[in-house]
């Protein structure tokens, strides 16, 4: 019987990205803090709820950028006996905090929009439009600053936040121009609600994914039944049980299982079987962190080790993988 762990370690991405990406995060954070404060002041002075909504969305960008920077720093911590996965799951915690905050902010803005629908507020377009244009320019510049670092998961998340905010800034400008020519103040409220709905929808998907990670469910991108079949076929095994597929963050997938070989098959090389399985799992499913135990027959059936009894009860591989 052989129990083997496999972890593929590529180049040290933190060292590779080095000071450059951290410096870009810091620059973008400072720049977006200035934009956010300016938009909040402009929103209050102009009376534009859409501009305040855009400022709030931009505030979420600042939070995302700060989390991204902290994530880059925290990811430097290596795994040890106490933190066996390092601090990879820190990303999930910060994502949940950010998503819940966006929910609260979005609901408040929608509530404020309904209040303003009943009691309209005049909008000073001479303040609203220049500040909205400044926000658009700032977010566009920030996109170019971070856009070249798509290998960093934190940078990708921040990049998407900035892209969405650039779109909302453009929508605020369009609403301002439409109000200037038509006098339809309801357009300001419409854009505010649209921005809020977008924030709530995008944060809901983040919460859903975070919940899957916390519950140690198989990632959505993985078909657990297919993984089990491929393991059995590649190993030439009689059966596969104790299969668990989970992730600790949004990019790294882990797998453990027991592979049962035919007891009558006298000669087989455990290391060769495990090597083939690791290669297959990496190429077909992107799984590079594994713990595979090769057994002669079904060692768990004796009842000595009861950890696999649940997955041998005929519930199938989906139960084993969740």
Image (tube, rainbow, N blue to C red):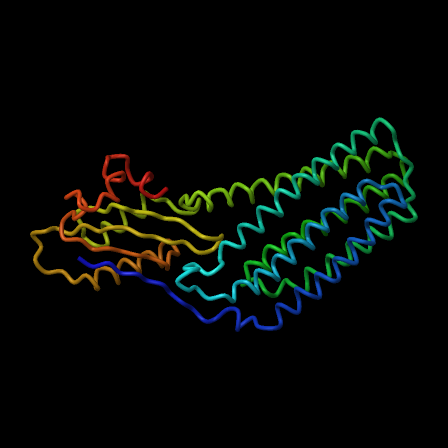
Q: Quadrant of the N terminus?
A: bottom left
Percent position of residue 149, x then y = 59, 65
Q: Residue at x 27, y 38 (%)?
A: 310
Question: Residue 153 in the image: x percent, y percent?
Answer: 54, 58
* Residue 49: % across, % down: 81, 40
Q: Is residue 61 left or right of residue 261?
A: right
In the depicted view, which residue is nearer to us: 238 or 91? 91
In front: 106, or 226? 106
Who is closer to the viewer here, 314 or 66? 66
Residue 183 position, x and y percent, is: 90, 35
Q: Residue at x 78, y 34 (%)?
A: 112
Q: Quadrant of residue 147?
A: bottom right
Residue farthest to the top, as pictured:
118
> In this view, which residue lies farthest toward the front?
82
Q: Residue at x 86, y 49 (%)?
A: 42
Q: Is residue 11 above or below residue 109?
A: below
Residue in the picture at 58% in, 58% down: 154
251 lies above or below 104: below
Does 16 sit left or right of 292 as displayed?
Answer: right
Quadrant (top left, top right, bottom left, bottom right) of the C terminus: top left
Total numbered badges shown on the rendered structure: 0
Q: Is residue 52 left or right of residue 16?
A: right
């Amino acid at each position: 019987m052989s129990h083997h762990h496999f972890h593929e370690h590529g180049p040290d991405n933190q060292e590779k990205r080095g000071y450059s990406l951290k410096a870009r995060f810091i620059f973008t954070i400072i720049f977006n803090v200035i934009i956010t404060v300016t938009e909040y002041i402009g929103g209050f002075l102009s009376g534009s709820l859409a501009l305040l909504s855009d400022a709030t969305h931009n505030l979420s960008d600042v939070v995302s950028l700060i989390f991204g920077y902290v994530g880059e720093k925290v990811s430097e911590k290596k795994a040890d006996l106490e933190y066996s996965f390092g601090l990879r799951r820190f990303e999930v915690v910060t994502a949940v905090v950010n998503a819940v905050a966006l929910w609260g902010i979005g609901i408040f803005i929608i509530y404020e929009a309904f209040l303003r629908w009943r009691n309209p507020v005049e909008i000073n377009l001479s303040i609203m439009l220049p500040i909205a244009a400044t926000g658009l320019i700032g977010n566009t510049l920030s996109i170019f600053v971070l856009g070249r670092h798509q290998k960093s998961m934190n940078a990708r998340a921040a990049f998407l936040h900035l892209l969405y905010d650039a779109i909302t800034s453009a929508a605020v400008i369009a609403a301002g121009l439409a109000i200037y020519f038509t006098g339809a103040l309801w357009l300001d409220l419409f854009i505010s609600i649209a921005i809020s709905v977008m924030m709530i929808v995008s944060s809901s998907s983040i919460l859903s994914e975070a919940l899957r990670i916390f519950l140690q469910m198989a990632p959505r991108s993985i078909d657990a039944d297919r993984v089990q079949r491929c393991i059995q076929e590649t190993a030439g095994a009689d059966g596969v049980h104790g299969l668990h597929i989970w992730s600790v963050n949004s990019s790294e997938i882990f797998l453990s299982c027991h592979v049962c070989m035919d007891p009558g098959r006298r000669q087989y090389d455990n290391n060769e079987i495990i090597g083939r399985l690791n290669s297959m799992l990496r190429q077909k499913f992107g799984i590079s962190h594994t713990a595979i135990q090769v057994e002669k027959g079904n060692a768990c059936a004796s009842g000595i080790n009861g950890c696999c009894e649940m997955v041998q009860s005929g519930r199938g591989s989906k139960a084993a993988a969740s």
